[in-house]
Image (cartoon, helix red, strand yellow):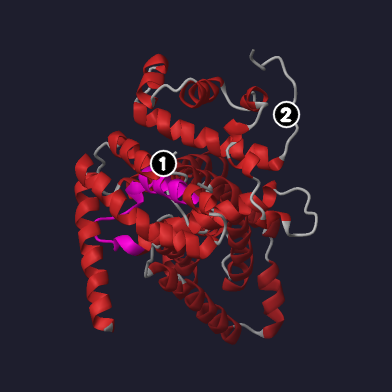
Amino acid sequence: MDDELENMGSAKEARWAVLLRQSLSGDRVAYVQFLTDIAPVLRGIIRARCGGTSDESEDLLQDTLIAIHQKRHTWRQTDAVGPWIYAIARYKVVDGQRKRRRNRIVAFDGTEDRVPDETLADPSLRGDLNTLLAHLDDTAATIVRDVKLNGLTAEEAGAKLNMTGGAVRVALHRAMAKLSAIAQHDVRPKMSNKERK
Amino acid sequence: MNTDDLIASIGAELKPSRAGLLTAWVVRGVIVGLVVTAVSFAAFWGMRPDVSVIWSDPALIAKSALPLLLGALALPWMLAEARPAGKSWSAAASTVVLILLGLIILATLYLTPSQQWWVQMMGHSISICLKSIPVLSAPILAGSLIALRRGAPEHPARCGAVAGLVAAGFGAAIYSLFCIEDSPLFYGVWYTLSILFVTSIGAIAGRSLLRW
């Protein structure tokens, strides 16, 4: 039984290594396949480790996938893929928890963290979105406005900004994460002249 | 955003990359730092006039060779620290330097009359030594840290500390060509202290600079 599990594990490892090797040489199909393969495994690990809401762990999963993408040159062809991606996920989970601790300013009785505040989970639902957007740089604010409010696709929004659709999605992900943090922080957004009509 | 969409967009961004990029960047950072250090050394310190005397005494060879060995062994260790789940034999191997230094110090204590111990340890240039080694290490540390920012260290402070060991090892080896204190009791104490100081600076810098 253990042997069987181990064989499954090493078969999975070998498959990941092949896909990642092809990805690093520029094969986009292999890369998407690789990311699609590892995502559910990482999701399981992240959920088990962080125990937060599923929104939170999905955010951490996306952070991890972006980190894997940005740090893919730290994997060497001879390294095992599993330990490498697990280490990245571990780092991102710990980092996320650290940020969450830092962002929590006033605790009342310790229970409010367990009650998800639906109005804050998606910052675009808040009425003062415009004020929140003043916290972002202009490009990010434009992207959020175009994609989330005006319903453009990432590609359409990108065309206006001279960015690829992929770059727009990554920037959007970052911007939404930042807005969530601000909303949860309950920073009273300053009224500034950056506020748009 | 939906995770599948994110995967699709990351996939669309992929560009082919060459193997061994991180190592190349970090080695380049260390080399640039070494060049800056060597130039400042030549300009402001210079070799001791009787530099060839080093070859005549094993304790003097060790004064230059041990920090050099430390720098060389800690370099692959530092690279491993910059890779998620990275492991290297060199972390354990680096302790060889400590063991060798310990043996040399013991031998010196054995061979030197005990009234001389304090005199030899205090020497004449403690403050120059304590200032010069960190200053000469600084460019190497800076070069490595800048390059290491492209890495993904699981423990940024530890990675920074090992970068400090690398920098201080090379920095102390270069400084040893200027230093005329020849007793292992001197360099065993003051070089080690300077190296530990640079290591702590590396840890503190790494904590914030090497986060990703």
Question: Main SS of the magenta segment?
Answer: helix
Residue B68 rendering spot, x and y as whole percentages:
44, 61
* Label 2 element class: loop
Q: Which residues are magenta?
A: A60-82
Is residue A72 inside the magenta stretch? yes
Q: Nearer the viewer, residue B132 or A105?
A: A105
Q: Quadrant of residue A13?
A: bottom left
Q: Name the front one of labels 2 and 1.
A: 1
Seen at 40% across and 58% down, the residue is A42
Q: Residues within 10 Å of mark 2 (few under 14, many from 20)?
A: some
Residue B198 rendering spot, x and y as whole percentages:
60, 56
Residue B151 rendering spot, x and y as whole percentages:
42, 49
Pinpoint the chain carrying mark 1. B
Q: CA distance from mark 2 to mark 1?
A: 28 Å
Does the CB distance between marks 2 and 1 fall below 8 Å?
A: no
Q: Is residue A189 left or right of residue A95?
A: right
Is residue B190 inside the magenta stretch? no
Q: Which residue is mark 2?
A: A189
Seen at 23% across and 79% down, the residue is A4
Tell me whether marks 2 and 1 sit on the same chain: no
Residue A6 rendering spot, x and y as whole percentages:
26, 76
Q: Is residue B48 visible?
A: no
Pinpoint the chain carrying mark 2. A
Seen at 75% across and 60% down, the residue is A110
Q: Is residue A64 left or right of residue A120?
A: left
- Amino acid tagged 2: Pro
Q: Residues within 10 Å of mark 1 (few under 14, many from 20)?
A: few
* Label 1 element class: loop
* Residue A125: assigned label: none
Q: Which residue is mark 1?
A: B2
| Location of residue B129 with respect to A151 vertically, above or below | below
Q: Is residue B41 left or right of residue A182?
A: left
